[in-house]
Amino acid sequence: MSSRLRWSSPFAAVAVALLSASIAVAAGPQTGPNPALRDPSLATATAPATYQVKLQTTKGDVVIEVHRDWAPHGADRFYNLVKAGYYDGAKFFRVISGFMAQVGMNPDPQVTAAWAAASIPDDPVSQSNTRGMVTFAAKASPNSRTTQFFINFGDNSALDRSGFAPFGRVVSGMEAVDALYAGYGEGAPRGAGPSQGRIAREGDAYLAAEFPKLDAITHATIVDK
């Protein structure tokens, strides 16, 4: 082979380095996971008065309109979680026909663990848990909401008395919510569905292996109006 076709000289090495640098500049800075995924203290922005979130799911797109005056703490938390990319890849692990579809544990157990104690204060209930309303799940104790939320399939206004405060509603794509896989039913130990404890410890590896039919949020974004 002619020496003119070989990139073996010092000049060739310099040329390769310059070419690589120019490609990197053209491509722009490389970005990784949002630091807020593992540090909730970085996700404390105040949400707009109203905003929309598009959930791209395995059953189709779902658009949620959030009203901050309905539940300010919930609206702020949802806004920050979506901006951080927290819900990307999250499975609807508890879907009960006629009741609700619940989601909000990150596929990475380390991310879920980082948010486990990052609770927000309770909001007064100003809206009712009727069909299409979106509400944060909570433990039995006060001020225990973190990342999990549910979408109401029907009239669950009985939840209002227990302090479940809706922060938004589905404005398009409710047919996709209705189509979410509900065959596993209630979660363990009360039912045969996924165990939240195991999701927290093992993440998506557990769900993919033992509950492969679950639907998921593939990507969640704030909608630019």
Image: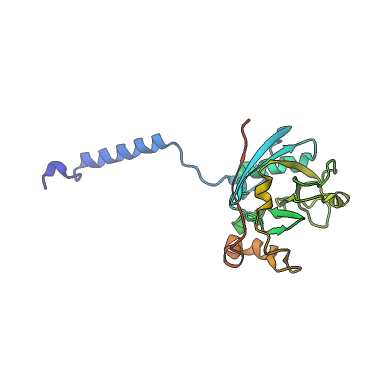
Q: What quarter of the picture does the C terminus occupy? A: top right
Residue depicted at 33% across the width and 40% down the height: 20
Residue depicted at 65% across the width and 62% down the height: 199
Residue depicted at 21% across the width and 42% down the height: 10
116 versus 184 height, above or below = above
**Residue 25 percent across, percent down from the top left:** 39, 35
Residue depicted at 72% across the width and 40% down the height: 76
Residue sitting nearer the eye, 115 or 199: 199
Please count the marks in the image: 0
Residue sitting nearer the eye, 53 or 176: 176
Furthest toward the right, the residue is 161
Among the 4 quarters of the image, the one containing residue 123: top right
Furthest toward the top, the residue is 225
196 versus 120 height, above or below = below
**Residue 179 percent across, percent down from the top left:** 65, 53
Among the 4 quarters of the image, the one containing residue 64: top right
In the shown orientation, is residue 71 left or right of residue 216? right
In the shown orientation, is residue 169 left or right of residue 158? left
In the shown orientation, is residue 61 left or right of residue 144? left
**Residue 72 percent across, percent down from the top left:** 78, 39
Residue sitting nearer the eye, 167 or 83: 167
**Residue 89 percent across, percent down from the top left:** 58, 52
Q: How is the image coloured?
A: rainbow
